[in-house]
Amino acid sequence: MQRPEPFGQPRLSGRLPAVRGLVFHGPKDIRCESVPDPTPPDARGAVVRVERAAICGSDLHLYGGHLPVPDSGFVIGHEVAGEVVETGGEVSDFRVGDRVLVAGVIGCGRCPRCHRGEVVRCERLETRVFGVGSALPGGQAEAVAVPGADFAMRRIPDGVSVEQAVLLTDILPTGYHGARMAAIAPGESVAVIGLGPVGLMALLCARLFGPARVFAIDTVPERLAAAGELGGIPVPADEATEHLAQATAGQGVDAVIEAVGADETILQALQWARAGGRVSVVGVNVRPDLPFPMGLALMKNLTFRAGLAPVPETWPALVPLVAGGELRPERVFTHRMALSEGAEAYRLFAERREGVLKVLLDPSR
């Protein structure tokens, strides 16, 4: 990809016929291929040269065939940071050369809620996720087209590395959203179920609210160890029911953050919460027939909340915390690989080999 000439103008030096991207061809079939060189979707859009991208746990739902998609043959991925190389004529807040992070979830960019960053509540019902269909190709590529650029991007400020910026595009906001939905008060007890990247971010963010204890629950020893290093109390999943009962005198924890999305872990969260407790679900589950135990929730007077993170809305809180060193989310990256190694990166992540927690991709290689 070549850089353009003046701001808001087409690339006078010519357009490359294709760039490389990781293309989804079906379950467990990701290929690094040439794809069309992105162009601004309209006058309000931009093109970003991707400096780094990451594989998200929700990408694995797609990879494993557990998330329905309308088609195939599209670039996957929604965690992206890079440099603006082209803008439409109506983009006012960004110029060519700006280094930016791109929200993994976007809205129409026109309505009042999108202007406030609440893209999951878009009044035009245009909430979209990059890289889950051909309508909005993803960012695990050398370049990505960004609709509504003024509201979907943020400049990477001083003090924030590109690796940190990538995490601010989805999983750190998702972890923060999970902690915020849990309404944690100082001194309370919290359980985080699932210690993949989102669960570890939820653990980090839960601690911002002053809980006395954060129990970190998973089946994978490496993930339990990582949670312990981040200040959580590691609890193997097969011991969690007994452990939480003993630790809370049989009452249950004040709040549970579910970061897996499986039927059984969502139901477990409801069981582990105390009477009057809160359950916050940020794990991806799109089943229309989840067997929700309404009787349990009713008799325990539980508060149950679930949803996608409104990524841009979280940036005013999270970006200063990262820039100031209060949050160090980049510790979640265990593997750094070339874009050309994308197929192997997905296999490694899906199979949980080599102690993998999260994979960072470099499109220059």
Image (cartoon, rainbow, N blue to C red):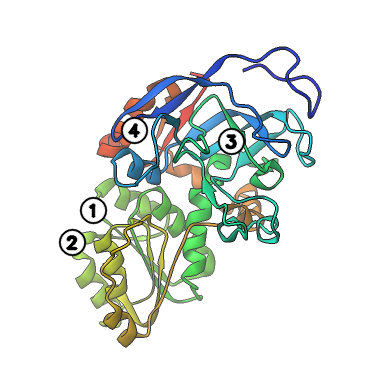
Residue 253 higher or lower than 207, as above or below? below
Quick one: 346 or 245, which is closer to the camera?
Answer: 346
In this rendering, is residue 193 above or below 351?
A: below
Left or right of residue 212, residue 285 in this image:
left
State the separation of the CA atoms marked 2 and 3.
Answer: 38 Å
Cα separation between marks 3 and 4? 19 Å
* Depth order, front residue of 344/199: 344
Q: Which residue does the numbered mark 3 point to in the structure image?
A: 81
**Helix, strand, or loop for circle 3?**
strand
Q: How many marks?
A: 4
Q: Residues within 10 Å of mark 3 (few under 14, many from 20)?
A: many
Of 228 and 142, nearer the camera is 142
Residue behind mark 4? 346
Q: Which residue is mark 2?
A: 238
Give x and y (percent) for residue 74.
Answer: 44, 31
Per the image, the residue denoted by label 1 is 219
Q: Callout 4 environment at 10 Å: few (<14), some (14 to 19), or many (20+)? A: many
- Asked if disc 2 and disc 1 are in contact, CB closer than 8 Å, the reply is yes
